[in-house]
Image (cartoon, grey):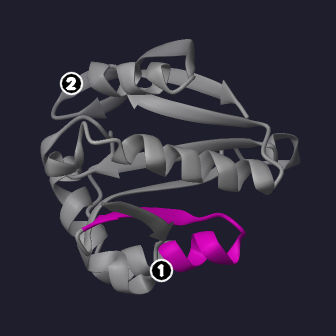
Amino acid sequence: MTTIRPATPQDAAAIQAIWLPIIRDTTVTFSSLERSVEDIAAFIADRQERGREVFVAEQGGTVAGFATYDQFRGGNGYVHAMEHSIVLGPDARGQGMGRALMQSVCDHAAAAGAHTMMAGISGENPSAMAFHAAIGFTQVGRIPESGRKFGRWIDLVLMQKIL
Protein backbone atom coordinates (compact mmCIF):
# COMPACT_ATOMS: atom_id res chain seq x y z
CA MET A 1 0.00 0.00 0.00
CA THR A 2 1.23 3.46 -0.89
CA THR A 3 1.15 6.29 1.62
CA ILE A 4 1.59 9.94 0.62
CA ARG A 5 2.82 12.16 3.42
CA PRO A 6 4.78 15.38 3.96
CA ALA A 7 8.52 14.84 3.88
CA THR A 8 10.67 15.26 6.96
CA PRO A 9 14.39 15.99 7.14
CA GLN A 10 14.84 12.29 7.96
CA ASP A 11 13.68 11.51 4.39
CA ALA A 12 16.60 13.43 2.87
CA ALA A 13 18.86 10.40 2.34
CA ALA A 14 16.07 8.40 0.66
CA ILE A 15 15.19 11.37 -1.56
CA GLN A 16 18.86 11.76 -2.47
CA ALA A 17 19.10 8.07 -3.43
CA ILE A 18 16.19 8.53 -5.87
CA TRP A 19 17.22 11.95 -7.19
CA LEU A 20 20.98 11.58 -7.78
CA PRO A 21 20.78 8.92 -10.53
CA ILE A 22 18.24 11.12 -12.34
CA ILE A 23 20.58 14.11 -12.07
CA ARG A 24 23.72 12.15 -13.02
CA ASP A 25 22.43 9.89 -15.77
CA THR A 26 19.42 11.45 -17.51
CA THR A 27 18.09 14.54 -19.24
CA VAL A 28 14.89 14.40 -17.19
CA THR A 29 16.39 17.38 -15.38
CA PHE A 30 18.76 19.83 -17.01
CA SER A 31 20.56 20.32 -13.69
CA SER A 32 23.81 18.53 -13.01
CA LEU A 33 24.05 19.85 -9.43
CA GLU A 34 24.22 16.92 -7.02
CA ARG A 35 22.64 17.78 -3.69
CA SER A 36 23.96 16.47 -0.39
CA VAL A 37 21.69 14.96 2.25
CA GLU A 38 22.11 18.20 4.21
CA ASP A 39 21.13 20.26 1.16
CA ILE A 40 17.98 18.20 0.71
CA ALA A 41 17.04 18.45 4.39
CA ALA A 42 17.44 22.25 4.14
CA PHE A 43 15.40 22.24 0.91
CA ILE A 44 12.54 20.43 2.67
CA ALA A 45 12.65 22.83 5.63
CA ASP A 46 12.76 25.88 3.34
CA ARG A 47 9.74 24.76 1.33
CA GLN A 48 7.73 24.08 4.46
CA GLU A 49 8.73 27.36 6.15
CA ARG A 50 7.41 29.23 3.10
CA GLY A 51 4.07 27.41 3.11
CA ARG A 52 4.94 25.00 0.30
CA GLU A 53 5.41 21.28 0.74
CA VAL A 54 7.53 18.31 -0.25
CA PHE A 55 5.54 15.08 -0.34
CA VAL A 56 6.93 11.56 -0.37
CA ALA A 57 5.31 8.36 -1.60
CA GLU A 58 6.10 5.57 0.79
CA GLN A 59 5.57 1.92 0.00
CA GLY A 60 6.29 -0.74 2.57
CA GLY A 61 8.03 1.81 4.76
CA THR A 62 10.40 2.87 1.95
CA VAL A 63 10.36 6.24 0.19
CA ALA A 64 9.74 5.47 -3.49
CA GLY A 65 9.30 8.99 -4.89
CA PHE A 66 8.71 12.62 -4.05
CA ALA A 67 7.05 15.75 -5.40
CA THR A 68 7.19 19.41 -4.48
CA TYR A 69 6.20 22.81 -5.78
CA ASP A 70 7.07 26.47 -5.55
CA GLN A 71 6.23 29.72 -7.27
CA PHE A 72 6.61 29.49 -11.06
CA ARG A 73 8.45 32.80 -11.47
CA GLY A 74 9.54 35.49 -9.06
CA GLY A 75 7.52 38.60 -8.36
CA ASN A 76 4.11 39.31 -6.92
CA GLY A 77 2.34 38.94 -10.27
CA TYR A 78 3.03 35.19 -10.14
CA VAL A 79 1.97 34.41 -6.56
CA HIS A 80 -0.88 32.23 -7.85
CA ALA A 81 1.21 30.35 -10.43
CA MET A 82 3.17 27.34 -9.20
CA GLU A 83 5.61 24.88 -10.78
CA HIS A 84 6.18 21.38 -9.52
CA SER A 85 8.83 18.69 -9.61
CA ILE A 86 8.08 15.00 -9.35
CA VAL A 87 10.64 12.20 -9.21
CA LEU A 88 9.91 8.51 -8.86
CA GLY A 89 12.35 5.69 -8.34
CA PRO A 90 12.46 3.13 -11.16
CA ASP A 91 10.41 0.56 -9.21
CA ALA A 92 7.68 3.09 -8.40
CA ARG A 93 6.63 3.94 -11.94
CA GLY A 94 3.32 2.74 -13.34
CA GLN A 95 1.78 2.02 -9.93
CA GLY A 96 -0.27 5.17 -9.36
CA MET A 97 2.26 6.82 -7.06
CA GLY A 98 2.86 9.68 -9.47
CA ARG A 99 -0.85 10.41 -9.68
CA ALA A 100 -1.17 10.31 -5.89
CA LEU A 101 1.82 12.61 -5.41
CA MET A 102 0.51 15.07 -8.00
CA GLN A 103 -2.94 15.10 -6.40
CA SER A 104 -1.33 15.96 -3.05
CA VAL A 105 0.78 18.72 -4.61
CA CYS A 106 -2.15 20.23 -6.53
CA ASP A 107 -4.50 20.03 -3.53
CA HIS A 108 -1.95 21.64 -1.22
CA ALA A 109 -1.17 24.41 -3.72
CA ALA A 110 -4.85 25.12 -4.40
CA ALA A 111 -5.61 25.28 -0.67
CA ALA A 112 -2.81 27.85 -0.36
CA GLY A 113 -4.36 30.01 -3.10
CA ALA A 114 -2.64 28.76 -6.25
CA HIS A 115 -4.62 29.07 -9.48
CA THR A 116 -2.37 27.21 -11.90
CA MET A 117 0.29 24.50 -11.81
CA MET A 118 3.07 24.45 -14.38
CA ALA A 119 5.30 21.59 -15.49
CA GLY A 120 8.66 22.22 -17.17
CA ILE A 121 9.51 18.97 -18.96
CA SER A 122 12.56 17.93 -20.93
CA GLY A 123 11.72 17.53 -24.61
CA GLU A 124 13.55 14.19 -24.33
CA ASN A 125 11.04 12.88 -21.78
CA PRO A 126 7.90 11.84 -23.71
CA SER A 127 6.71 9.62 -20.84
CA ALA A 128 6.52 12.67 -18.55
CA MET A 129 4.54 14.56 -21.20
CA ALA A 130 2.12 11.63 -21.53
CA PHE A 131 1.80 11.34 -17.75
CA HIS A 132 0.99 15.03 -17.38
CA ALA A 133 -1.53 14.93 -20.24
CA ALA A 134 -3.23 11.95 -18.56
CA ILE A 135 -3.71 13.93 -15.33
CA GLY A 136 -5.16 17.01 -16.99
CA PHE A 137 -2.18 19.12 -18.03
CA THR A 138 -2.15 20.78 -21.46
CA GLN A 139 0.96 21.63 -23.46
CA VAL A 140 1.13 25.42 -23.65
CA GLY A 141 4.60 25.91 -25.08
CA ARG A 142 7.90 24.56 -26.25
CA ILE A 143 11.11 26.53 -25.87
CA PRO A 144 13.61 25.08 -28.35
CA GLU A 145 17.18 24.40 -27.26
CA SER A 146 16.74 26.11 -23.88
CA GLY A 147 18.49 23.48 -21.76
CA ARG A 148 21.91 21.96 -22.13
CA LYS A 149 23.19 18.70 -20.72
CA PHE A 150 25.63 16.02 -21.88
CA GLY A 151 26.92 18.38 -24.58
CA ARG A 152 23.63 18.85 -26.41
CA TRP A 153 20.75 21.31 -26.55
CA ILE A 154 17.37 20.15 -25.26
CA ASP A 155 13.90 21.65 -25.68
CA LEU A 156 11.83 22.64 -22.65
CA VAL A 157 8.14 21.73 -22.89
CA LEU A 158 5.73 23.71 -20.75
CA MET A 159 2.48 22.10 -19.60
CA GLN A 160 -0.20 23.70 -17.45
CA LYS A 161 -3.19 22.71 -15.37
CA ILE A 162 -5.70 25.22 -14.01
CA LEU A 163 -6.43 24.25 -10.43
Q: Looking at this rendering, what residue extends furthest in the front direction?
A: 1
Q: Point out which mark residue 83 bears.
A: none
- Residue 17 falls left or right of residue 55: left
- Residue 119 falls left or right of residue 23: right
Residue 47 among magenta residues: yes
Q: Earlier in the sequence, mark 1 or mark 2?
A: 1
- Residue ID at (63%, 45%): 106
Q: Amino acid at mark 1?
A: Ala
Q: Amino acid at mark 2?
A: Arg
Task: Note whether 155 is above or below 47 in the view shown.
Answer: above
- Residue ID at (26%, 75%): 61
Q: Point out which mark residue 152 bears.
A: 2
For the N terminus, which image quadrant?
bottom left
- Residue ID at (49%, 13%): 142
Q: Looking at this rendering, what residue extends furthest in the right direction?
A: 77
Residue 34 among magenta residues: no
Crowdedness near tag 1: few (<14), some (14–19) or many (≥20) residues, C-alpha within 10 Å:
some
Q: Which residue is mark 1?
A: 42
For the C terminus, which image quadrant?
top right
Q: Does any portion of residue 146 appear in the rendered image? A: no
Secondary structure at numbered mark 2? strand
86 or 41: nearer the viewer: 86
Task: Note whether 94 is above or below 12 in the view shown.
Answer: above
Secondary structure at numbered mark 1? helix
Chain part drawn in magenta: 44-59
Mark 1 vs 2: CB contact within 8 A: no
On the image, the x and y values in percent for residue 10 come to 36, 86
On the image, the x and y values in percent for residue 145 come to 37, 18
Crowdedness near tag 2: few (<14), some (14–19) or many (≥20) residues, C-alpha within 10 Å:
few
- Residue ID at (46%, 48%): 100
